Image (cartoon, rainbow, N blue to C red):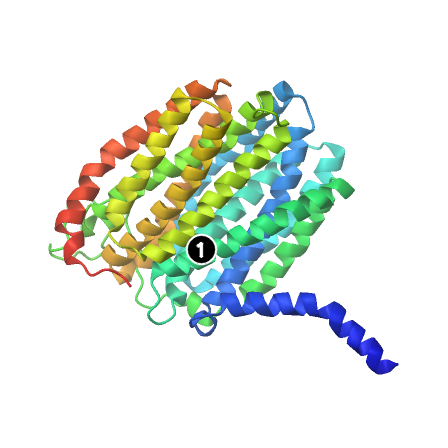
Amino acid sequence: MGGSVRAVGRALHFPFTGTARGIRKATHAHGAGESGLGKLIELHAVNGAGDVMITVALASTVFFSVPTDEARGRVALYLAITMAPFTVLAPVIGPLLDKLPHGRRAAMAGAMLARALLALIIAGAVSTGSLELYPAALGVLVASKAYGVVRSAVVPRLLPPRFSLVKANSRVTLGGLLATGVAAPVGAGLHAIGERWPLYGAFVIFMAGTFLSFSLPPKVDSAKGEDIALLAADEEHLHGPHRQPVKRPGLRTVGIAVTHALGANAALRWLSGFLTFFLAFLLREHPLTGSSAAVSLGMVAVAAGVGNALGTAVGAWLRARAPEIIIVTVLAVVLGAAITAAVFFGAFLVACLTATAGFCLALAKLSLDALIQRDVPELVRTSAFARSETMLQMAWVLGGAIGIVMPLNGPLGLCVAAGVLAIGWLTTVRGLIGSARHGGASKGRVA
């Protein structure tokens, strides 16, 4: 009898243990387990799952629970109270974390713990309608972006042997995307039970992430051989990779490829923020043909997620071949998609645009990572990742702010998006192509 009970217990337990073992095997493959990259992938998956739980709760409270006009005012208030201060705080995050190179694990754990506690505060505010919701949401946003900056700085410390930074970032990003895809329907199911339940789920997830942060290898906290990177150089900093080295090398001291790639990525990140908020209201007011507002938004979100996952996978396969050309190409592709969607506005083209934007954003970001790894001296490389990520987050915030104030006119909004992308492409294409012809060809490809 006891043997039968144990057999039944093992049968019921196997789907969970087998799934956990399969996930651990995938995240720790090719030396990622020994280097610590596997644990970072798992931590980023936890981060993505927790963030989407809070997003589900906030979306239902601020956006879906009231009429469209009132929702637009509430989201505008949300943006004003959260994102406006964030634009001031974002430039401080990178330099502040530069001063804490020996406490990166503690910083990541702190970002997790802060969001766990703030999730409980938001849970109370959701039921009472208290204004505590907005400062708590600001805290979640800041903590999430701070985690993202630290994570970008940590990845180069955990590269397995013969592992490119592009491949490592691809794995980390895919882990987060998969966890988000799994957690989103779970969050929706919890919300069906009660509006607080997704926030309780976020609390549990972020508490797990707090402890998981300290499981990263101690070398994450090592600052040996590092210095602070500058995103701009003054006149005393000589430009070009063959010039006399400076005491504190910055991104512009190694050539123009990195700064132009950062500008192109900022345009794409701006587009991501713009589409997130603009389409949220546009599709609520004018859903896709034959669909409800919720289904329309879900279709667009899935298209963007699938595009992002495909872009990440293709980026890992390309392994940073000609990153300048990749950035120029994907920016031109998404510009063409935006112009097409603006001229022939329709449900199918909107979905295609979001998928294309997700695909191109992933490829461009991986190419930027490859350029930083190739062109920025190791002395300041970790700091360069942190500061570039902060700039990209600010571009997303700006795009979101413009998206919320745009009139709900699809062709007009997409024309504005195409205009910003055109400016980003025109101001960076010459420098990136020139770098690919003269500087990039002489530098070995990162395998």
Q: How many marks?
A: 1
Q: Tell me if 299 is positioned left or right of 326 in this view.
A: right
Estimate the x, y position of residue 364 in percent, counting from the top left: 34, 45
In this rendered view, identify the residue nearer to me: 181 or 158.
181
In this rendered view, identify the residue nearer to me: 233 or 40.
40
Please identify the quarter of the rendering in which residue 287 is found.
Answer: top right
Residue type, numbered disc 1: Val
**Residue at x-position 41% and y-position 38%:** 356
In this rendered view, identify the residue nearer to me: 433 or 154.
433
Instruction: Classify mark 1: helix, strand or loop.
Output: helix
Residue holding disc 1: 150
Q: In this orientation, does residue 131 appear? A: no
**Residue at x-position 54% and y-position 63%:** 213
Please identify the quarter of the rendering in which residue 299 is found.
Answer: top right
Estimate the x, y position of residue 438 in percent, counting from the top left: 12, 49
Disc 1 residue crowd, few under 14, some 14–19, many 20+, Cα 10 Å: many
**Residue at x-position 31% and y-position 49%:** 368
Query: In the picture, which quadrant includes the N terminus?
Result: bottom right
Q: Is residue 204 above or below residue 32?
A: above
Query: In the picture, which quadrant includes the C terminus?
Result: bottom left
Q: Is residue 215 above or below residue 166?
A: below
Estimate the x, y position of residue 54 in percent, counting from the top left: 63, 44
Q: In this orientation, does residue 309 appear? A: yes
Q: Tell me if 245 is positioned left or right of 425 in this view.
A: left
Q: Tell me if 302 is positioned left or right of 194 in this view.
A: left
